[in-house]
Image (cartoon, helix red, strand yellow):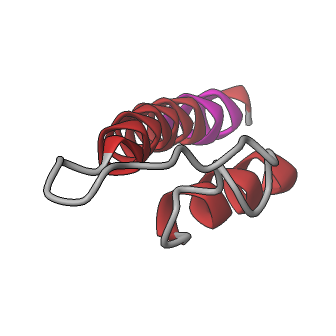
């Protein structure tokens, strides 16, 4: 669970959402005056990591509750 937490926070807090620096996905070129396509990709990657952090929070709560009621 610690590795999952570390990975989620590293992707979530990275400036490029870890897409280029961790996953080595290429940076798309963009024309002058046109919107940057990389920002959209970073947005969706960041949203995905937000979903992983929410899942992690729910799993942590369930783990704590299951250990608490076990004793």
The number of callouts visible is: 0
Q: Could you tell me which residue is drawn at 81 percent across and 56 percent down?
A: 2
* Stretch in magenta: 61-69
Q: Is residue 10 above or below residue 36?
A: below
From what the image shows, is residue 46 above or below residue 52? below
Towards the viewer: 7 or 62: 7
Residue 25 lies in magenta, yes or no? no
Asked whether, in this view, residue 34 is left or right of residue 11, the answer is left
Q: In the image, what residue occupies the spot 50% across and 49% down?
A: 29
The quarter of the picture where residue 21 lies is bottom right
Residue 67, position as x, y percentages in the image: 70, 36
* Left or right of 45 on screen, residue 18: right
- 25 or 53, which is in the foreground? 25
Residue 12: give x, y in percent of width and height: 50, 58
Which quadrant, please, contains the N terminus? top right
Residue occupying image coordinates x 48% and y 72%:
15
């Amino acid at each position: 669970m610690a590795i999952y937490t570390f990975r989620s926070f590293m992707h979530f807090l990275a400036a490029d959402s870890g897409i280029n620096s961790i996953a080595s996905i290429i940076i798309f070129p963009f024309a002058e005056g046109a919107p940057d396509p990389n920002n959209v990709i970073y947005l969706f990657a960041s949203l995905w990591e937000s979903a992983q952090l929410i899942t992690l929070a729910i799993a942590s709560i369930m783990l704590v509750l299951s250990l608490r009621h076990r004793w």
